[in-house]
Amino acid sequence: MANGTPSDGSARRQRRKATVAAALGGCALVAAATTPAAAHGGGHHGGHDRGTGYVALGDSYTSGPGIPAQVDANCARSDHNYPSLVAAARHVSAFKDVSCGGATTAEMWKAQGTNGPQLDAVRRDTGLVTVQIGGNDIGFSSIIGTCATLSATDLAGAPCQRYYNASGVDQLTVRIAQTAPKVDKVLRAVRARAPHARILVVGYPDLLPDDGSGCYPTVPFAAKDFPYLRDVGKRLNLMLRLVAAWNGAGYADTYGPTVGHDMCKAPADRWIEPLQPTSPAAPAHPNAKGEAAMARAVLDRLGRRY
């Protein structure tokens, strides 16, 4: 900084934050009615990920808690999660999955139990990096617990929505907006460590019926909170897509391919388990079919030209 004038780098960072914030403000109103489409630009910065190494970063939706076989008890990581399936399908020469249940963007830089900082796995010669993060930053688990508890007070209404809008501003929309610069920081850090890597942000799957219907008590939310929480998931995915595009990364839409296989469906048809799972998986998380569906979405995105 000279004579009180911000450096070029500082100015660029300020412009980036302003652009992302503006995009979120302009798009939040339509997010509730639109399933985000995959971004069409960015993601391929030279080289090909086949034979050059693949690193998977992420939270429990990436790690696959409860899905056999669990290969890391600390992180609840399965060898049949979507990164493992993608690595096998792409025949990568080196594969490192450091996803960990409970991870937030902060765990990209700090250890989580026996799991080191996730970004430490990304090296200069890494060819492919997938990133699925942000759900825990907005408080995914606490949101589910809060909404399930409040449902008993007004089963036909929207007590959860009222709770998060008590101040006159939807607090979950605020949390998503606050998470955007954190995800932006993660993607910039990945790019700095692996300048030639193909970076793919992976969205979150469809947890609740896309048509807004409910299934109490299988999923213990009040009737009008089902569409509210569905829309929260869509806003989170929209933010991830926008931040990916801003950073020249690709975006894998896992919401669209999982519509019709949410927590409310019969056991044979669902890919996301309810709060009392009937297939090996964590509550409100993908089962093996769900991880396979996300793997297909990632592989489809990787198969395109950027």
Image (tube, rainbow, N blue to C red):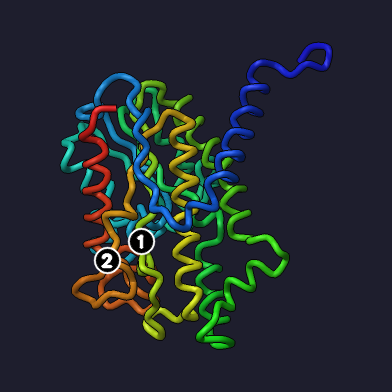
Give the secondary structure at mark 2: loop
Q: Which circle marks residue 78 in the picture?
A: none
* Residue at x 53% of width, y 74% of height: 145
Q: Which residue is mark 2?
A: 260
- Using the rendered image of the protein, determine whether residue 60 is visible from the camera's viewpoint: yes
Q: Nearer the viewer, residue 214 or 272?
A: 214
On the image, the x and y values in percent for residue 105 come to 53, 46
Do the residues under discs 1 and 2 have CB atoms within 8 angstroms? yes
Residue indicated by mark 1: 206
Q: What residue sits 47% from the left and 39% below the top?
A: 242
Residue 288, percent from left and from top: 23, 62
Which quarter of the figure has residue 250? top left
The N terminus lies in quadrant = top right
Q: Is residue 177 above or below residue 54?
A: below
Mark yes or no: residue 103 visible: no
Please determine whether, in this image, residue 219 is positioned above or below residue 140: below
